Amino acid sequence: MAELFYDDDADLSIIQGRKVAVIGYGSQGHAHALSLRDSGVDVRVGLHEGSKSKAKAEEQGLRVVTPAEAAAEADVIMVLIPDPIQAQVYEESIKDNLKDGDALFFAHGFNVRFGFIKPAANVDVALVAPKGPGHLVRRQYEEGRGVPAIAAVEQDATGNAFQLALSYAKAIGGTRAGVIKTTFTEETETDLFGEQAVLCGGTSALVKAGFETLVEAGYQPEIAYFECLHELKLIVDLMYEGGLEKMRWSVSETAEWGDYVTGPRIITDATKAEMKKVLAEIQDGTFAKNWMDEYHGGLKKYDEYKTQDSEHLLETTGKELRKLMSWVDNEEA
Ligand code: NDP
Ligand code: MG
Ligand code: MG
C-alpha cells in the first residue's frame, strides 16, 4: 500500500527556514512561487534574459533575478522549466551555484532518471510533483484546498531530504490533499508511459481511428465527431468521479453490454504486447534519447506530426462544431 502524508506529517517551518529559488514561471512555476510566498517562504524567481513571463511574475509581487543569481542566493532550487532545456540551464546557471547541503528539486524526474543531469553527491535531490496542472494547483491553494502530490528523494545528502520535500509540498497545498511517496524512477517511467500509452497517445489514436471508421463508412463527420470525441468527456468525467463502475451505472445497459464485449476486441492482446514494448523503451532510455535528439535536432518530425494532425478532418470538423458550443472555452490555442 502506498505511503501517504498529510499536513500533520509535514513541518512547514523547515521550508520557511530556507531560501527557495523557483526557476521558471510557467504552469508549475507560477503556482509554486506564489503559494510558497503566501506560505511565508523566502522565494525568488529565476528567469532568463528576455523572458516573456518576467513581467507577470513582477506584477504578482515576486522578485525576479537570473537563474544563476537565484541559484546562488537560494539553498533550495526548484527547476520548473521545460524538461528538454533543463540540462542546459543546469549546466550554465545552477551547477556551480550549488553548495554543500543545498537541495535541488524537480517536479518531474526525467532529467535525473535518464542521466541528463547528474548532481554532485553533496546536495539533496528531491521531487515534488503536484498531480495536476499549475493553474489548478494555485487555485486549490487559494481556496484552502490542495492538489494531491507525489514526492521522492533521489539523493539524501543531509539525511533530511524527505522532510524537506514534505515541507515544500505543504507550502504549496499538497499535504492538504495528500502526498504519496514514490521514487524518481517510478514517477518518471509511469508518467511517460501513462501519457504515451493511455492519456495522450492511446486516447488520440483511439478517437482518430473511431472517427475515421465512421466517416469512411459514409456517416457525417459532424455526427462522428460527437460520438467519438465530444462525448468522451462525459464518459471520462464519470470514470473520474466513480471509476468504471459509475460510468457503467450511468450509461444504458446496451452501452454497458457493448463495452464488455467490444472493448477487448479493440484493445487486444496485441495492443497490450505493444504497450509492454513501449514501457521497455521508456525503461531502457530509448524514448528519452530519441526525444532529446528530436528536440535538439530542430523538432522536424514533431512539427510534421503536428501539422498532419491539425489538418485531419477530425480537427477541422471540431473547430467548426465548437463554435456552436457557447459553454466550451473554445479560444484557439
Ligand atoms: P512551462 O513550459 O510552463 O515553463 C515555462 C517557463 O520556463 C516560462 O516561465 C519560461 O519563460 C521559462 N523558461 C524557458 N526557458 C528558460 C530558461 N532558459 N531559463 C529560465 N526559465 C526559462 O513548464 P511546466 O510548468 O509545464 O513544467 C515545468 C516542470 O514541471 C517540468 O519538469 C514538467 O515536467 C513538470 N510538471 C508539469 C506539470 C504541468 O502541469 N505542466 C505537471 C507536473 C509536473 P518564458 O516566459 O520566457 O517562456
Ligand atoms: Mg508528463
Ligand atoms: Mg451514444
Image (spheres, helix red, strand yellow):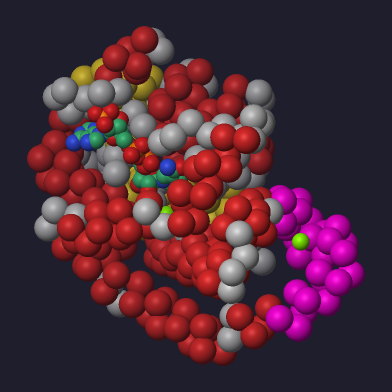
Seen from the viewer's position, the closer of residues 263 and 25 is 263
Can you tell which quarter of the image residue 322 is in? top right
In the figure, 299 relative to 169: above or below?
A: below
| Dominant secondary-structure state across the stretch colored magenta | helix
Residue 69 percent location from the top left of the image:
17, 25
Q: Residue at x 44, y 30 (%)?
A: 32
Q: Left or right of 11: which side holds 237?
A: right
Q: Which quadrant is the N terminus positioned in?
A: bottom right
Q: Which quadrant is the C terminus positioned in?
A: top left
Q: Residue at x 58, y 43 (%)?
A: 321
In the figure, 186 relative to 15: above or below?
A: below
Q: Left or right of 162: which side holds 222?
A: right
Q: Residue at x 50, y 65 (%)?
A: 208
Residue 310 percent location from the top left of the image:
38, 51
Q: Is residue 258 magenta?
A: yes
Residue 34 percent location from the top left of the image:
45, 22
Q: Left or right of 246: which side holds 171?
A: left
In the figure, 230 relative to 27: above or below?
A: below
Seen from the viewer's position, the closer of residues 124 and 195 is 195
Which of the four quarters of the rendered structure image does ligand 2 lie in? bottom left
| Residue at the front extreme of this rendering | 218
Seen from the viewer's position, the closer of residues 55 and 162 is 55
Can you tell which quarter of the image residue 97 is in? top left
- Would you say residue 156 is visible in this rendering? no
Give the magenta-colored segment's residue range.
Answer: 234-262
